[in-house]
Image: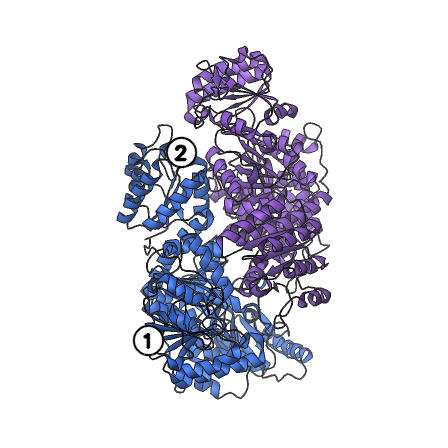
Chain colours: A blue, B purple
Amino acid sequence: MDLEKLHHLFYPKSIAIVGASTNPLKPGGQPLAALLSAGYPGKLFPINPRYTEINGLECYPNLKAVETKIDLAIIAVPAQDVPGVLQECGETGVKTAIIFSSGFAETGEAGKKLQEELLAVAQNYGLRFAGPNCLGIVNAPAKVMANFAVSHHPEKVIKENAYAFISQSGGFGTITYAEAQKQGLGAQILVSTGNAADLDFTTFLEYIVRHTGVKAVAAYLEGVKDGKRFAQVADEALAKGIPLIILKVGKHQVAAQAARSHTGSMVGDDDIYQGFFFQKGIIRVNSVEEMLPLLSLFADGKLPQGNRIGILSSSGGGSVYLADLCTDAGLEVVKLAPETCRKLQENLPAFITAGNPVDLTSHAMMEEGILKNALEAVLADPAVDLVLVYFNVAGEPTRQIIGQLEATYRKASKPILCIGWSHNEEDHLLAQELMRKAGIPHTLQVEHGVKALASLAHYSRHRRTLLESQEAPRLSPGTGNPAVEFLSGLGYKELSEREAKKLLELYGIPVAREEVARSPEEAVAIANSIGYPVALKVLSPDILHKTEAGGVMLNLQSPEAIAAAYDQIMTNARSFKPEARLDGVLVAEMIPPGRELILGIKADPTFGNCVLVGMGGIFVEVMRDFAAGIPPLSQEEAASLLRRLKGYPLLEAFRNQGPADLDSLLAVLRQLSRLALDLEGKIQELEINPLIVGEQGQGVKAADALILLK
Amino acid sequence: MDLEKLHHLFYPKSIAIVGASTNPLKPGGQPLAALLSAGYPGKLFPINPRYTEINGLECYPNLKAVETKIDLAIIAVPAQDVPGVLQECGETGVKTAIIFSSGFAETGEAGKKLQEELLAVAQNYGLRFAGPNCLGIVNAPAKVMANFAVSHHPEKVIKENAYAFISQSGGFGTITYAEAQKQGLGAQILVSTGNAADLDFTTFLEYIVRHTGVKAVAAYLEGVKDGKRFAQVADEALAKGIPLIILKVGKHQVAAQAARSHTGSMVGDDDIYQGFFFQKGIIRVNSVEEMLPLLSLFADGKLPQGNRIGILSSSGGGSVYLADLCTDAGLEVVKLAPETCRKLQENLPAFITAGNPVDLTSHAMMEEGILKNALEAVLADPAVDLVLVYFNVAGEPTRQIIGQLEATYRKASKPILCIGWSHNEEDHLLAQELMRKAGIPHTLQVEHGVKALASLAHYSRHRRTLLESQEAPRLSPGTGNPAVEFLSGLGYKELSEREAKKLLELYGIPVAREEVARSPEEAVAIANSIGYPVALKVLSPDILHKTEAGGVMLNLQSPEAIAAAYDQIMTNARSFKPEARLDGVLVAEMIPPGRELILGIKADPTFGNCVLVGMGGIFVEVMRDFAAGIPPLSQEEAASLLRRLKGYPLLEAFRNQGPADLDSLLAVLRQLSRLALDLEGKIQELEINPLIVGEQGQGVKAADALILLK
């Protein structure tokens, strides 16, 4: 889309407020008052036939009466009047609008109709709008307070171009924005999407990532319409190094879905989102408390090389506590170099041994220079990637200590997070304010501060590997693709195991050797060619779970055993489902035992075909151990999908087993992701269960496969 | 011990301050100033030969000059002078002391000696003391500010008899106490244990639980000396319904320990603490942020009947968010009764459908009565056990709304947690203050607030089941106990499998049938009596892991196979360890396959013999899936030990397997806990690996066992 249009929304040279009010508590009054008090430098046009003047500005009866071209119209009139106003916007060449008014799709069918009317008018004139039923937009550095919920506190904005916050809930967004301001972590940009009839979450995100220069984007998300567009924007943000920090709600609102495959029936909407976030390096948070320290740290723009942390603490007890929290969060409380310890020891009382955490003792905090010297020593240690400083101040030295901290922070290329604290309320507030002004990342949330450092380290590493990693090449979709042709030749939706395996083979996924036998004699002949032992499996488009039907016999060692098994399988299948069409049995090679995994594809309404992987058997069934990814999967994305499994350690060497053949497994995952893309919209479910993974160099084999078409 | 003495420490009628100072910032000046400003009602005696008067009080040159009997002496003099002062305390009949002075065991060997001197003096006179190197004690309702770190803010104490806070770190304790006060959650009692030369953590805890009437105890804990005493006090607290909320640090400080058994080598000190906390219903927190909302809720004293939560929210977005957090925390966002929905609907705009969470909408919050009516409706619903109220207020209705909330809260028997919020800083502070005064549990930490509700529900349920559950009866320890006698007859530390199983049999733990054969012929004869198939296992006190030595052959079906296996095992064992004494082979029954678990005992330096249980094979080895418990185990404690395993679902019915024989498994766990108690100090490690657990009614069997004595 034409994102340039959104410049008029975020950086308008002229704003009209339709439904302007003199009451600063009303939706039509609040933005006017806020724009004026913020010192908005563009032109402002209150529109209201009942006034000739508001707050010293000339008030116009309607948009037509304004001679200047309007970049942005804020619309705060009753719902039924909005289509008319929007029509007038179109006729007078207004470029963008924000519709505060509620009473649209959120209220039911009639409102939905009215909302569709808005969209039709806007599209007719090429006008883009936010809302309806939204709280508007803030662009603090441009002094655009086009909203009716939050006030402008430039002194509470964390720093220029720090971060944007997009919210799909007006009330919740406001709470978060205000709480962030209170902590001195105010956003540069706030967007309330409201009903998103025209401009939606992804569009705002795309614009912000591409055009505003913010260092991070935070969001409250209920869901997107088009997962693939979201994925593209997420890729762009990752490439630009703009982290996305998302509070996604609706975790437990699982739409009831019938599914035939094991994985299919277990994977919910949120599992797919979770997989998507992980894969794209999006930082998911579960609470506002978790989000805020992240913003302070991520908006600083420094990325660590690794996860090795140095901790300075003015409390001995605190240092053990912090070391615990860091280790729990996945940070390594690294051993400092002897040279660092030597430098530290000069600063410390004799009975304290310099180590990591550095116990500065409360005594040491009463003198200037001690914290600074210790911090510089730890920053200079090549083993340290990032630093946590936990200190308390009181009285006279507060300003000096934080002044020195600022100087050290400015020179440092490694990320630093400060938790500065005082028993004395006055010094406490002073310390926070000094750190905010200095732009030093700081928080009072110890637990979430540590988690934020861990997220930063994880993001940094994850981003590096993701960007280095290659995407899987894919076949062209549509006709000409042999897989598509193969499927189009079928007249039914449930593929036989044989057909399913054929499809996998088209993508180079190794399947167990097997051939169809229509009599005991044929079965024996095939076994003679494949070699003993073999397995026999019933072949029927009407029997999906063959084991339950008594349709599988394993490890058959002789012609006699094969002949007997053939007859038994036929008898079992007939009694299991008398109406089933029986096409014979598959005679299959027995694969040497190995790790068993389940691979699958599931069609998701938001993200399209997703790739699933789980450890086999009890792990996936009893422990719900699987991970979801969005195709295409790069080498690293496929690898990280595996690493997310609880049972991942089972793929490493243990006891007498060597490590699993990860190269072959990753290749299959990436091929499966190609298949998922190529057959988008065609596959309902696909499951390879099990995929048998040999030890290193021994390859993998799909022992069984199930495919349902749409 | 004679806890009565501690009354003089917490409720002293007279206090002497040795080393009293006119400077309120000095350790000798701060308590004097704090006691005076708090209005301490007892008698105060500053002691300092340099003054005749301090703060209007007569100052004495030494304790002997005071004619009144002193209940508590606060000692704030240099370390080297402390033994002399304590001696004087003893001579003048001072009952208790608090020693602020540092320079003792925390500084090294010389300090340790000095500390021992203190203890000797005190014991000589029957005087009890806190410290040295501590920050002292606060008992706010009694106005005893016997500390030099925190100030008295009676208006910040959450409520009378709310909770006590015990800290093993002075600095950290102070930070936490001050932060709690800032949130209006100040403790009644604060104890800084310091070096705990005499009065230690457990003693303080015992006194507080037994004698102070607090509703909860919070603590910062690095470790206790005697786990068994701690366990007794924890049991007492549980029985009295005084929850213990503990921030235990040093999680990752694992003392390097050599161990022979699988579980033994994996279980660290903190795993044992974790098991202990879980077993005794102690709420473990990982951060101060997590602790504070718990205090607000637990100090209220209301326990819910279950975990079914009703949520009221004035933000639609917030309500989805809260439902997610509640579900994640293990609370059930329950469906409300039709009658409740009907009552709610009367209060809500037509386009909102009444459900749980109740979306009150921000509009509804502007009118009085709406929140109150909705809250009463939800409280009256029999399906609801506890309630979360998330609301924002602004302007005029703030006082009225919270006033109504208070009235409803007072009538309610179900726990309520409020998160009340305003964009407007002034209303925000007002709302917090009104809720504090009203005693309504409230927090601004949404995530941890929800976790606190979940902890409350869990504590309530866990406490009920623990109190209902019976302890395992145990044999008497010491001589006369056949197990002790059996062990005392052995001259070596590593028991053979046969001996180990014999010991288990003494406790009624079923073991696989087996007999010793010293020749192939004997082996065949035994197999003929046990029945085929059998397993052969090498019998040698010098070979612990038999499989690795090639000393195990399974599933032998015939006399020929047995004879061959016998010879093979002997050959393997000789080449594995030529110097090993070979006593023949065990001919053992083959146990039908079942779930495999590992059970064990480990001697812990703090808690003594602990019971360990893990899912067998890969679960315990690769995934570190085990849980630790402190004997004796009651039925419920044993059951909850199992439920803590990640692989617990494997014990339930799945696929074609019925549920595991939990009754037999629990019986074995409880018997093992008896054994652990009876043989305290005698066993170094014990491991049953595997314990094969059949389906319901089929029993369990120890297939192999390993015991190392101390």
The residue singled out by tag 1 in the image is A4
Give how far across and how far down residue A622 sits, in percent.
Answer: 59, 61
Q: Nearer the viewer, residue B421 or A657?
A: B421
Give how far across and how far down residue A684 sits, in percent.
Answer: 52, 78
Mark 2 Cα-neighbour bin, 10 Å: few <14, some 14–19, many ≥20: some
Quadrant position of the N terminus of chain A in the picture: bottom left
Q: Secondary structure at mark 1?
A: helix
Q: Secondary structure at mark 2?
A: helix
**Of all residues shown, which one is farthest toward the front?**
A52
Do the numbered discs 1 and 2 sit on residues whose CB atoms are within 8 Å? no
> Which mark's residue is nearer the viewer, 1 or 2?
1
Q: Nearer the viewer, residue A161 or A255?
A: A161
In three-dimensional space, the C-alpha distance between marks 1 and 2, rounded to whole angstroms, equals: 55 Å
Chain to which the residue tagged by mark 1 belongs: A
Res. B613 in view? no
Q: Is residue A502 above or below residue B378?
A: below
**Of all residues shown, which one is farthest toward the left?**
A411
Q: Is residue B149 above or below residue A11?
A: above
Give how far across and how far down residue B511 sits, in percent.
Answer: 67, 45
Which amino acid type is shown beneath numbered disc 1? Glu
Which amino acid type is shown beneath numbered disc 2? Ser
The residue singled out by tag 2 in the image is A362
Q: Nearer the viewer, residue B413 or A629?
A: B413
* Image quadrant in which you'd find residue A113: bottom right
